[in-house]
Image (spheres, rainbow, N blue to C red):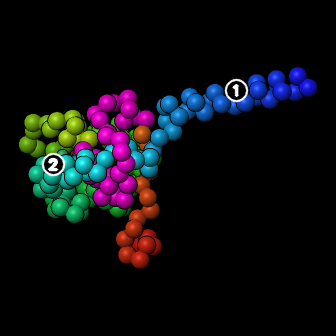
Amino acid sequence: MRSVSAFFAWGALVAALPLAGASAQSARTTADGVFTEAQVKAGETAYQSHCAGCHGLDLKKTDAEAPDLTEGPFRFGWQGKTVGERFDKIRTTMPKQPLPRLEDQMYVDIIAYILSFNGVVAGNETMSPNAAKLEAITIDLPAAKSGGGRRR
Ligand code: HEC
């Protein structure tokens, strides 16, 4: 019987290894409560002063060239990407003008607000502007909740 239990112990160890590696790196998504409600509030304030002029108070664009930050193409652009990727893009390109850039933490808060607006639920963890950590969070937007719950 000794060899059988050794077999199982070894099997369990081998099975657990890749899982441990995965959860440290990429298993997290925005569904895991990766930002706080306070960040969403701060992000909303920052969004209204720095982004709403073009992207709209309800995240539907007011500027002809600016994209909506909710539904449609937004969902394709964000779904399945990492927060880090979006953070990089926004931080280096937005607000379109005028520069200067905002504080990194403010960009992260704004992203929390945009995600929350799109149905992602806040949690207990504060999202910080740490590139590696943000890269490890995959964006997982819940199904659009407009109208009667069905997509148009
Ligand atoms: C002066 C108008 C203007 C302001 C202010 C502005 N944007 Fe934009 N934004 C644009 C335009 C135009 C585009 C599309 C062209 C481009 O990407 O350069 C865009 C594109 C984007 C995109 C790309 C779409 C995507 O799905 O990735 C995001 C995200 C974004 N803006 C977020 C922001 C955030 C966050 C702020 C505030 C910090 C902001 N924008 C402020 C005009 C603006």
Classify mark 1 as within 8 Å of ligand 1 or not, answering yes or no. no
The one of 79 and 113 positioned closer to us in this rendering: 113
Front of the two marks 1 and 2: 1
Residue named by callout 2? 46
> How many tags in the picture?
2
Q: What residue type is labelled 2?
A: Ala
Closer to the N terminus: mark 1 or mark 2? 1
**The residue stretch that appears in magenta:** 109-136
Q: In which quarter of the image is residue 89?
A: top left
The one of 113 and 96 positioned closer to us in this rendering: 113
Q: Residue 123 in magenta? A: yes
Where is residue 7? Give x, y as percent: 82, 26
**Residue depicted at x 65% and y 31%:** 16
Element type at marker 2?
helix
Q: Which amino acid does label 1 sit on?
A: Leu
Distance from the alpha carbon under mark 1 to that under mark 2: 48 Å
Where is residue 58? Give x, y as percent: 22, 63
Residue, far bottom:
148
Quadrant into which the N terminus falls? top right
- Does the CB distance between marks 1 and 2 fall below 8 Å? no
Please tell me how crowded label 1 is: few (under 14), some (14-19), or many (20+) other residues with Cα within 10 Å. few
Residue, far right:
1
Q: Is residue 126 above or below residue 64?
A: above
Quadrant into which the C terminus falls? bottom left
Where is residue 84? Give x, y as percent: 35, 37
Is residue 119 shown left or right of residue 53?
right
Q: In this view, does 55 lie above or below 13?
A: below
Classify mark 2 as within 8 Å of ligand 1 or not, answering yes or no. yes
Q: Is residue 68 visible?
A: yes
Which mark identifies residue 13? 1
Is residue 40 shown left or right of residue 34?
left
